[in-house]
């Protein structure tokens, strides 16, 4: 499959740069649509690869709506193409715990309608690339940056969609000519350890870097790495099979609490792409099932990789673990690697040159194999923000919802990785039970990474303000005097969730909604954990008297001017939004008769009457 490399942000000819970006955009769009041709027929678009994910039709529409939603948010376009699509296809790859996709049943559009929508988006983006003003080098403030953001977002979904395709039953997938499966080696490979020399590691990049980056790549982190040992090869299917055959999935000594919960929930007994037969195991490649390639890298989640390390530690009498982020960079440097454009296509199995893994002895980098490409490598470092980390206003929750010590970094890229995914500074992380095109190598190390997640001062400040004892939300009590029903309330712009908890004192059901997952996470965690820390302040459901009403609240992430279909049926609304008249126009059909609305600016909308004008807020009612 022909995949272009991403363009540089630098240059001195904007006309030429437009052409480079246009080619890269259309190549990305073509690849994404091509991989959906693997679905056997249109009915498969409405099936899920596994229960916690959306049907495939969602992902097919999602990447196109991302362009429109971000362009609209940043005022680069003033009109949407299809507001309904741009709502239902809005949130994608790593749904937060409060976005349980099983709870929402949409009437999904027809595949041909989504194809037609994607065509309109392609036409619009091509037009914008031809016409929007920008200068070189392209910076994060340029409109063209948002175009690049949309392209790189779709590159992420090329890879994650290929994983979902592979998790589909094989009868739902058809084999395309591009589905080339590499041959396993006939050699016998025994893993061993390579010494990685001590060195000072600096991670992160400057804002003026010449390649596109996501927010988590910028800033700086330094660590002195002591000498350690790393496995020469990625762990192969053959090496991992020893763990399986020795009862690794049934011996709970090898699994931590999260891993044991994973086993209990999934009943897993072997890696997901192994197919058990009467004669042993076959192997699920992308488009077909083949005899087990023993020397392809095993593909597992982080919990399985960690369990293997504990098993091997017990067996060998030494302590094995997954590499840290800084240790991986030390391996990268010792391997002599620089940036993706210094590699020839045959040097590494990445950028969709093939649509399968390759033998673990095929790509040698100064004595250590598959440092980049083939499959991603799980690490032991949870993702965090470097010193100087800042969110981008167009995508303020790309990274920060994952800064929770629960999302493990993956290193090195895979055969399905392209674009930003194969760049030196890229940083991606997933919850440990997630499957990607990911395996692992193990290390013996005494290095300790110290992480300080003090990047979110604005969230901490908002949290302290919201949960202050003197914050009584007087408008809730005042508005309650006008209510004819206390069944369901909408708290829009709920930030860290305090006001939603207060509303739950009055209403049987409360939707706490905010556009930022960063703020929502505070309320979600308090609801789930019962007690959380907000810097030096301890927040407790019991202290606030919320323990008996917490079940009434559902936190959701949404755009106030692009509401999802399930946001409806309200008796009461708190509207902390900009452009109140636009919001009222959008919300009016979702309200019950005589609904009460609290606003914080004076509207001119004629279908609502002002019942009371208080200090800092108004109480409205539908007419």
Image (cartoon, grey):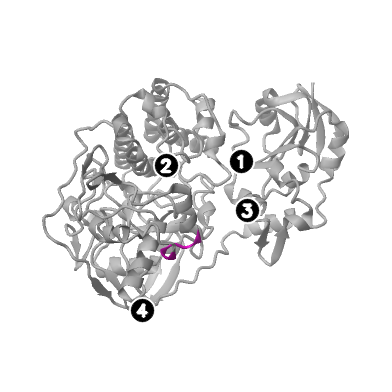
**Main secondary structure along the magenta-highlighted residues:** helix
Q: Going from the N terminus, do you reach mark 4 or mark 2 first?
A: 2
Q: Going from the N terminus, do you reach mark 2 or mark 1 first?
A: 2
Give the spatial CA distance, label 3 vs label 4: 37 Å
Residue 144's mark? 2
Relative horizontal placement of residue 103, taking residue 476 as reference (left or right): left
Relative to residue 237, is residue 511 depicted above or below? Answer: above
Q: Secondary structure at mark 1?
A: strand
In terms of depth relative to the viewer, which is nearer, 417 or 485?
A: 485
Give the spatial CA distance, label 3 vs label 2: 36 Å
Pair 4/2: label in front: 4
Question: Are the residues at dot 2 and dot 1 in contact (C-beta closer than 8 Å)?
Answer: no
Q: Secondary structure at mark 4?
A: loop
Pair 2/1: label in front: 1
Give the spatial CA distance, label 3 vs label 1: 13 Å
Q: Is residue 468 visible?
A: no
Give the spatial CA distance, label 2 vs label 1: 30 Å
In terms of depth relative to the viewer, which is nearer, 458 or 542?
A: 542
Q: Is residue 535 visible?
A: yes
Relative to residue 552, is residue 412 depicted above or below? Answer: below
x, y percent for residue 455: 56, 61
Residue 556's mark? 1
Relative horizontal placement of residue 560, taking residue 340 as reference (left or right): right
Give neighbour class at mark 4: few <14, some 14-19, many 20+ (Cα, 10 Å).
some
Question: Which contiguous range is marked in magenta?
Answer: 253-257
In terms of depth relative to the viewer, which is nearer, 312 or 326?
A: 312
Give neighbour class at mark 1: few <14, some 14-19, many 20+ (Cα, 10 Å).
many
Pair 3/1: label in front: 3
Quarter containing the N terminus: top left
User: Which residue in the rendered view is the most extreme toward the left?
Assistant: 186
Give neighbour class at mark 2: few <14, some 14-19, many 20+ (Cα, 10 Å).
many
């Amino acid at each position: 499959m022909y995949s272009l490399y991403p363009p540089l942000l630098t240059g001195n000819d904007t006309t030429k740069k437009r052409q480079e970006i246009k080619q890269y955009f259309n190549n990305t769009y073509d690849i994404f649509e091509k991989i959906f041709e693997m679905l056997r027929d249109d009915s498969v678009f409405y099936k899920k690869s596994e229960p916690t994910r959306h049907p495939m039709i969602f992902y097919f529409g999602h990447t196109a709506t991302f362009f429109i939603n971000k362009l609209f948010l940043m005022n680069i376009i003033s009109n949407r193409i299809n507001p309904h699509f741009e709502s239902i296809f809005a949130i994608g790859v790593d749904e937060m715990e409060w976005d349980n996709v099983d709870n929402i049943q949409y009437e999904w559009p027809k595949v041909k309608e989504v194809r037609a929508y994607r065509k309109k988006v392609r036409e619009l983006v091509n037009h914008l690339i031809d016409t929007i003003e920008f200068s070189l080098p392209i910076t994060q403030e340029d409109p063209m940056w948002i175009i690049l953001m949309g392209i790189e977002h779709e590159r992420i979904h090329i890879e994650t969609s290929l994983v979902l395709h592979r998790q589909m039953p094989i009868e739902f997938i058809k084999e395309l000519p591009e589905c080339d499966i590499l041959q396993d080696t006939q050699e016998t490979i025994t893993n061993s350890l390579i010494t990685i020399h001590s060195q000072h590691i600096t991670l992160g990049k400057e804002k003026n870097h010449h390649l596109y980056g996501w927010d988590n790549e910028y800033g700086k982190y330094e660590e002195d790495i002591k000498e350690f040992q790393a496995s020469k090869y990625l762990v192969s299917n053959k090496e991992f099979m020893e763990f399986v055959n020795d009862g690794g999935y049934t011996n709970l000594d090898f699994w931590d609490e999260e891993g044991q919960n994973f086993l209990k929930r999934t009943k897993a007994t072997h890696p997901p792409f192994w197919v058990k037969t009467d004669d042993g195991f076959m192997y699920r490649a992308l488009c077909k099932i083949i005899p087990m390639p023993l020397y392809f890298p095993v593909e597992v989640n982080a919990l399985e990789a960690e369990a293997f390390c504990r098993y091997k530690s017990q067996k060998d009498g030494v302590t094995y673990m997954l590499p840290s982020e800084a240790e991986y960079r030390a391996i990268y440097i010792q391997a002599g690697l620089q940036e993706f454009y210094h590699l020839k296509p045959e040097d590494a199995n990445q950028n969709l040159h093939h649509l399968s893994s390759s033998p673990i002895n095929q790509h040698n980098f100064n004595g250590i194999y598959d440092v980049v490409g083939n499959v991603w490598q799980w690490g032991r470092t949870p993702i965090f923000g470097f010193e100087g980390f800042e969110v981008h206003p167009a995508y303020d929750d790309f990274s920060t919802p994952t800064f929770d010590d629960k999302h493990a970094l993956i290193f090195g890229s895979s055969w399905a990785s392209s674009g930003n995914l194969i760049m030196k500074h890229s940083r991606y992380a997933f919850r440990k039970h997630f499957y990607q095109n990911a395996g692992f190598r193990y290390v013996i190390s005494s290095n300790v990474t110290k992480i300080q997640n003090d990047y979110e001062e604005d969230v901490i400040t908002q949290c302290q303000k919201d949960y202050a004892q003197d914050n009584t939300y007087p408008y809730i009590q005042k508005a309650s005097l006008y209510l004819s029903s206390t069944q369901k309330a909408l708290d829009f712009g709920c930030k860290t969730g305090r006001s939603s908890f207060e509303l739950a004192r009055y209403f049987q059901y409360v939707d706490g909604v905010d556009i930022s997952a960063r703020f929502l996470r505070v309320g979600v965690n308090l609801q789930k954990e019962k007690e959380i820390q907000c810097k030096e302040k301890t927040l407790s459901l019991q202290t606030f008297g919320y323990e008996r009403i917490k079940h009434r609240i559902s936190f959701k992430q949404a755009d106030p001017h692009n509401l999802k279909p399930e946001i409806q049926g309200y008796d009461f609304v708190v509207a902390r939004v900009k452009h109140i008249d636009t919001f009222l126009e959008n919300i009016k059909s979702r309200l019950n008769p005589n609904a009460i609305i609290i606003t914080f600016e004076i509207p001119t909308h004629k279908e609502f009457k002002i019942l009371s004008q208080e200090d800092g807020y108004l109480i409205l009612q539908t007419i």
